[in-house]
Image: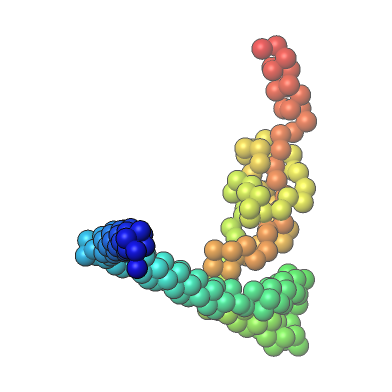
Amino acid sequence: MNEENIKEEKILDEEKTDDIQSTKTNESTDDLNENNSDSPENIIEKLNEEIQDLKDQRLRAAAELENFRKRAEKDQADALKYGVSNFAKEIINIKDNVERAQSSISEDVRSNDAVKSIVEGLDMIAQSAVSTFEKIGIKKIESLNEKFDHNLHQAMMEIENDEVEPGTIVQELISGYTLHDRLLRPAMVGVSKKTQQNQQSDDSDKEEN
């Protein structure tokens, strides 16, 4: 082997050595970066974030469960409280019919021994209806001499009356009822208004002013 070949081989060997050292240096740098990214501080920070996420998920799940429980309890309570609405309306209709029958009986007929037992039977049915109303939470709406309230009353007519404030209920045509705090049937009523003469007088006063 001549000197030129020996020199070329030396140069090649040196280049290979440099390449190997460069590669090792790069690998060491990469390993160092990986080690930095997985340092104890970074790992702890990541774990803390995961723990916080889990806590938030648990709190949200607990809140949703509590809301569901409250809704279920309310629905159950409402079902027990207002589930008799249709039954209550039927009872009211029966009581209306009994009251109509009672009002149609004159005092002379009441004193007649032949129908006395029938009259007493009607009275007992009416009392039984009132007792049932109290048990299931049905309450009669007090209307006469009260101010008209569209939430409780239905105006069927206007009646001229200067003795009370306009909008006062002066006649009850059909009784109204509530079931606990809900309207079961509005009271059908007659509402007072000023007489035509007083209304004209008020209109004249307003025009003068």
In the picture, measured across the screen, residue 190 lies left or right of residue 25, that is: right
In the picture, measured across the screen, residue 108 lies left or right of residue 57, that is: right
Q: Quadrant of residue 173?
A: bottom right
The N terminus: image quadrant? bottom left
Q: Which residue is at the front of the view, 90 or 165?
A: 90
Instruction: State how the image is colored.
Output: rainbow
Q: Quadrant of residue 16?
A: bottom left
Q: Residue at x 63, y 55 (%)?
A: 152
**Which residue in the rendered view is the most extreme toward the left?**
40
Q: Which residue is at the front of the view, 76 or 71?
A: 71
At which x and y percent is residue 63?
41, 67
Q: Residue at x 77, y 51 (%)?
A: 156
Q: Which residue is at the front of the view, 144 or 11?
A: 11
Q: Quadrant of residue 161?
A: top right
Q: Residue at x 69, y 42 (%)?
A: 192
User: In the image, is residue 199 above or below residue 154?
Assistant: above
Whether residue 91 is visible, yes or no, is no
User: In the image, is residue 106 above or below residue 151?
Assistant: below
Q: Residue at x 64, y 47 (%)?
A: 148
**Which residue in the rendered view is the most extreme toward the front?**
2
At which x and y percent is residue 70?
45, 71
The C terminus: image quadrant? top right
At which x and y percent is residue 66?
42, 71
In the picture, measured across the screen, residue 167 lies left or right of residue 135, that is: right
